[in-house]
């Protein structure tokens, strides 16, 4: 059985690295490291306390995958906070590990698009596609997502790296944004869409390390496969 698993893995890997090229041009709807900016909004402790639509452990893990993958792939990223010193508190450690706290843009506006420094930083990334994730979905994500959409940007949201005070609040916010043309996706979809091809060896280890650490059952599966294939 072990030999069979190993043989299949070798065949798949060999096919991947020996492929002569891609048969079709990928859709421009897909995200790539070169076509978008990531905006992480208010993943802060006080905002997390009231988040009820998703388990905090899952939210933190998804945030870790998101921050880690954006760092790994060199995605232009803006981390913004609201009243960090006076109300909302520190950013999740899963973000500070990849993006130092002294680089965050703090503000008072609920909608970061209305803050001069945040808006300037986002627009300066010079990407027509913008991906948002943050707390809370119905306020701090709806505001900039709809505002960016109104200014002609192609807007995506990472739904499972967002949270709100209730499941209904989160879902209604997602529905509202989708009706305006904002495109939803998940954290795992995001990192796999960036990797796209397992033969991309320069990011292969980084991607699998992130999933092993933060990816729940999928991460355990990767750990299992890597250990078993050693034998």
Image (cartoon, grey):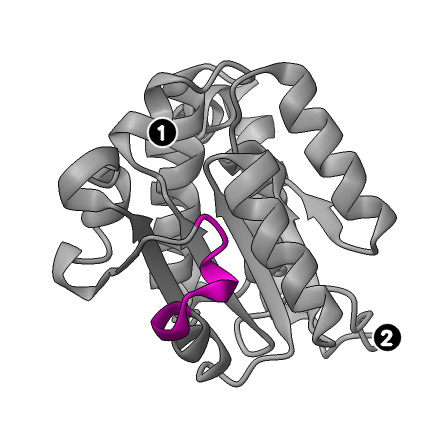
Q: Quadrant of residue 57?
A: top left
CA gap, disc 1 and disc 2: 43 Å
Front label number (1 vs 2): 1
Q: Which disc is residue 88 wearing?
A: none
Q: In which quarter of the image is residue 34?
A: bottom right
Q: Is residue 117 magenta?
A: yes
- Residue 231 in sight from this viewpoint: no
- Residue 116 in sight from this viewpoint: yes
At 78% from the left edge and 40% from the top edge, which residue is drawn?
176
Query: Residue 199 or 176: which is nearer the viewer?
Result: 176
Q: On the image, numbered disc 1 is attached to which residue?
A: 47
**For the residue labelled by badge 2, is the local secondary structure a helix, a strand or a loop?**
loop
**For the residue labelled by badge 1, is the local secondary structure a helix, a strand or a loop?**
helix
Q: Quadrant of the image for the C terminus?
A: top left
Query: Residue 20 or 23: which is nearer the viewer?
Result: 23
- In the picture, measured across the screen, residue 4 lies left or right of residue 104, that is right
Query: Residue 193 or 49: which is nearer the viewer?
Result: 49
- In the picture, measured across the screen, residue 143 lies left or right of residue 83, that is right
Q: On the image, numbered disc 2 is attached to which residue?
A: 24
Relative image position of residue 154 (x, y in whole percent): 72, 69
Q: Quadrant of the image for the N terminus?
A: top right
Local packing at callout 1 (Cα closer than 10 Å; few below 14, some 14-19, many 20+) is many
Relative image position of residue 111 (x, y in whole percent): 50, 54
């Amino acid at each position: 059985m072990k030999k069979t698993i190993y043989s299949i893995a070798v065949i798949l890997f060999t096919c991947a690295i020996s492929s002569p090229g891609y048969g079709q041009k990928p859709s421009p709807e897909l995200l790539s490291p070169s076509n978008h900016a990531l905006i992480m909004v208010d993943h802060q402790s006080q905002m997390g306390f009231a988040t009820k639509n998703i388990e905090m452990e899952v939210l933190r893990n998804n945030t870790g995958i998101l921050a880690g993958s954006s760092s790994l792939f060199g995605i232009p990223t803006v981390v913004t906070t609201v009243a960090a010193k006076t109300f909302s508190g520190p950013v999740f450690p899963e973000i500070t590990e990849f993006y130092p706290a002294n680089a965050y843009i703090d503000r008072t506006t609920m909608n970061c698009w209305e803050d001069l420094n945040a808006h300037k930083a986002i627009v300066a990334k010079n990407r027509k596609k913008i991906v948002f994730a943050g707390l809370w979905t119905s306020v701090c994500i709806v505001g900039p997502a709809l505002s960016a959409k109104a200014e002609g940007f192609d807007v995506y949201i990472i739904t499972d790296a967002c949270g709100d005070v209730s499941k209904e609040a989160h879902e209604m916010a997602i529905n509202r944004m989708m009706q305006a043309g904002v495109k939803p996706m998940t954290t795992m979809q995001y990192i796999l869409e960036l990797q796209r091809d397992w033969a991309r060896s320069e990011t292969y280890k980084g991607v699998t390390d992130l999933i092993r650490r933060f990816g729940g059952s999928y991460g355990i599966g990767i750990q299992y496969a890597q250990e078993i294939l050693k034998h």
